[in-house]
Amino acid sequence: MTETTRNWATPPVDILEQGNSIVLRTDLPGVRQEDVSLTLEDGTLHLKAVRPSRDLTYRRNFRLNPDLDPDSVSAELKAGVLELTLTRAVEATRTIPVRSIS
């Protein structure tokens, strides 16, 4: 079956805040690591996972908050559960001088 005729689904996602990180967790039963594709483009994280045994494609897109570091994204697939971890960017504190105008 071609990609255009494949069945697709949008899996539910749990979003958790853990310290300085955001964790996205979704069930992808029957999906192998080599069948998962994650891409980051223009601040949007794209998830695509294929489950060949059911001829099913999971798709989900996540718009990242500007305070998340796009270079920090990590992914782990274990027992059919995909977990994505994104860390907040460390923002340096900046002192702003105040001028006196007479």
Image: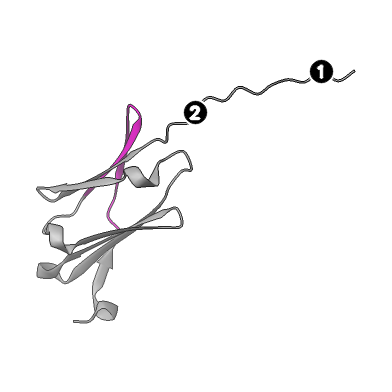
In the image, residue 49 lies in the stretch drawn in magenta: no
Q: Residue 9: x, y in percent?
A: 27, 63
Residue 66 located left or right of residue 97: left
Is residue 31 something that shows in the picture?
A: no
Q: Residue at x 24, y 72 (%)?
A: 7
**Which element is circle 2 on?**
loop
Q: Quick one: quadrant of the N terminus?
A: bottom left
Residue 45 vs residue 98, the one in the foreground: 98
User: Which stretch appears magenta?
Assistant: 10-26
In the image, residue 25 lies in the stretch drawn in magenta: yes
Residue marked by disc 2: 92
Say which amino acid is labelled 1: Ser
10 Å neighbourhood of mark 2: few (<14), some, or many (≥20)?
Answer: few
Snapshot quadrant of residue 83 = top left
Q: How many marks?
A: 2
**Which element is circle 1 on?**
loop
Q: Residue at x 57, y 25 (%)?
A: 94
Residue 40 vs residue 3, the one in the foreground: 40
Is residue 64 something that shows in the picture?
A: yes
Mark 2 vs mark 1: which is more N-terminal? 2
Q: Residue 85: x, y in percent?
A: 28, 41
Q: Residue 69: x, y in percent?
A: 40, 42
Residue 79 located left or right of residue 101: left
Residue marked by disc 1: 100
Q: CA distance from mark 2 to mark 1?
A: 26 Å
